[in-house]
Image (cartoon, rainbow, N blue to C red):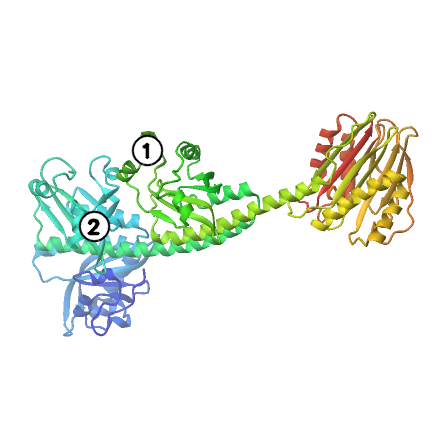
Amino acid sequence: MHDSPGTASDGRDRGSPILSALPFAALTVALDGRVEGSNTAASEVLDVDLAEGPLLSSLFVEGERGAADEVLGQALHGSGWQGVLAIVAPDGAARPVTVSCEPVWERDAVGRVLVVLEDVDRSRARARRLADRMSRLARVITELLSAEDVEGVTTVFTGHVADAAGATVASLSLLVEEDRLRLVGIRGGRDGVADRWRTFSLAGTPAGDAVIAGRAVVLSGRDEITSRYPTLERAAEGERSILCIPLMVSGQPIGAVSLSFPGVRRFGAAELEFLQVMSDTCAQALDRARALAAARDQEAKLAFLADASLELSSGLDYESTLAKVAQLAVPGFADWCSIALGVDGELRPLAVAHVDPDKVALAREFQRRFPADPEAGQGGYDVFRTGVTQLVSEISDEMLEAAVEDPEELSIMRELNVRSAMTVALKVNDRVLGVITWVAGDTGRRFTVADVAFGEDLARRAAVAIDNSRLHTEVREMAVNLQRAVLPAELPSLPGWEMAAHYSPTGDLDAGGDFYDVIDLGDGCLALFVGDVMGRGVHAAAAMAQMRSATRALVAVDPEPAAVLTRLDRVFERYDLEQLVTMFYAVVDPSADTLVVANAGHLSPVLIRPDAEPTSLSVPGEVLLGAGGGRRTAVTFPFRPQDTLLAFTDGLVERRHEDIDVGEARLRDAARGLAGGPLEPALTDLVKTVCDPDRDDDVAVLVVRRS
């Protein structure tokens, strides 16, 4: 907290609202020794313009300025001081006052000093009482100034108030709704009182009546308590007295503090005034703490939304996106989260996350056993129908019991500790995809109207991510299905041959252009080819289908490799095809033990023999199909029983920032695993070993072996 220095020339307080509430002269002094805040009482006592921020020592008579500096230095080092020094009175005379200097801690260091000035010309008894109260009040103010959150303020207040007033029980409650209070802190009382009074109605309670009336409620003795509040829980047996004071900020109640005393207690005007000042000080500190918490919360929400946007845009897998959305706000915003999407008008729970991993299974079980009622006028289905957010800030035991009839359902909800909930529609433009529900309980957080805008913003981002990932998944499946539709459904099963193939697309939405095929030429002979259409998308897939169909048709006319590639060049010329295509084509004749190969700019296949290292076939890489044609040649290699041929597209061996020769060497080394044993598992292992998991190209591999 920062106090504006000095007092205004018209006598108005310049500084902390806490100083303004004090009935005696009070100052706050900065680390450099200058006055930075004061109240009206201080300006009436001192003959100095406090608005100019004078040095504290200048307020005292000349002979005691050194002492003033000494006690100020002591307080700045963390030790308070109380004694009598003489100040300069408005008439210029020396005026003895009781000076109290207390350090104000901010985190782990002294941030300023609170100085209280009190006239010593009073009776000793009153001076002692006032000094004791000022000391207690100064201690409360000091700690309240350094408290950073509501829990800290509550702990300070309930502890010091109980000590200062002689109460055995002190509690603080804050308004959570217009007609309900929530207990945020209590010292003393019977076992379990915090759970029993977690939230309670204003009506019929002393704290509630204090809030409604805006003034203290005093109950002296058991008879008075019983006559006004016959069902009120007592802190202990025997005579009791109760004092409840509303916490007011700018004339509006924000809660109440309650004190319970043993015996019959009568409260004098001075004591009530003292406790009222303590309560006002607490109210100001609470208001400041809540404002700081709101600012921190807003800052955290903005940072969270920025991080969430990056996180949600980083993946396009549908199921992982749902899980990611559910986990995003747990535990920072909620204790658990569930997502249900609409399928044929029905809400189906698809993801759940909980701050306690052990309760995830319980939350799933609850959703399975107790699905929402589609006809209910509130809850998930109503949000799904209307698109309007539903917020229940506080869910009391009474509300649960009234809303849930099934004892087992009620038991699970209590175990999950459902205390606050917000359900928001997952909307993309005007389409409602489903609902997302956040629940708070274990951490003590309660959702408020201020959380609705944040929840709806997060839900919009999540809905877009879910919609994009669902669209991506659908389109990717369509692309893969299109690709597979033009590839052979299965390889031919022929005597004397073993065959295996592998095809895997990238994660892109577009279909690729890799293709392969094996054709039975009769008499044990095979024609086989592997190719790659440059580019991606519908045009590449269409060109791939054309190439595979044209090749099969040309093989039926003349399967000789050079003839097939030459005729394919003419197809490109005649039909003005735009895509470039690489292609390896071969014919195997077991009767002659030969492999005849022609290559149109494709990577060389690998030959694996049982008694030799795998080698890349040296085949001239002639021009690509579609690049202008030219003379096509074929090369003949021996191909004996147990020999294996491995043909592939470049997606298998290429890696970023690596020469392709390195990839081909890696492939030849892994190809040893194809020399014996079943081909299918061996090919799967080879692809896992060689292929780059971060590749951006499809992979097609064809293996044939003479058996």
Element at label 1: helix
Could you tell me how many numbered marks the image carries?
A: 2
**Which residue is rendered at x = 87% and y = 51% of the image?**
629
**Which residue is rendered at x = 42% and y = 35% of the image?**
367
Of label 2 and label 1, which has the lower sequence position?
2
Which numbered mark, 2 or 1, is in the foreground of this view?
Answer: 1
**Which residue is rendered at x = 24% and y = 35% of the image?**
192
Decide if residue 41 is on the left or right side of residue 491.
Answer: left
Q: Nearer the viewer, residue 13 or 585?
A: 585
Amino acid type shown at disc 1: Leu
Residue bearing mark 1: 410
Decide if residue 148 is on the left or right side of residue 118.
Answer: right
- Residue 5 against residue 226 in the figure, above or below: below
The quarter in which the C terminus is drawn is top right
Residue 685 drawn at (x, y percent): 71, 32
Decide if residue 130 is on the left or right side of residue 522.
Answer: left
Q: Nearer the viewer, residue 582 or 611?
A: 582
Report which quarter residue 613 is drawn in: top right
Specify few, some or many for label 1: CA neighbours under 10 Å numbering under 14, 14-19, or 20 or more. some
Residue 630 drawn at (x, y percent): 90, 51
Q: Nearer the viewer, residue 152 or 420?
A: 420
Image marks 2 and 1: residues in contact by CB distance under 8 Å: no
The quarter in which the N terminus is drawn is bottom left
Residue bearing mark 2: 256
Report which quarter residue 75 is drawn in: bottom left
Amino acid type shown at disc 2: Ala
Residue 457 drawn at (x, y percent): 44, 53
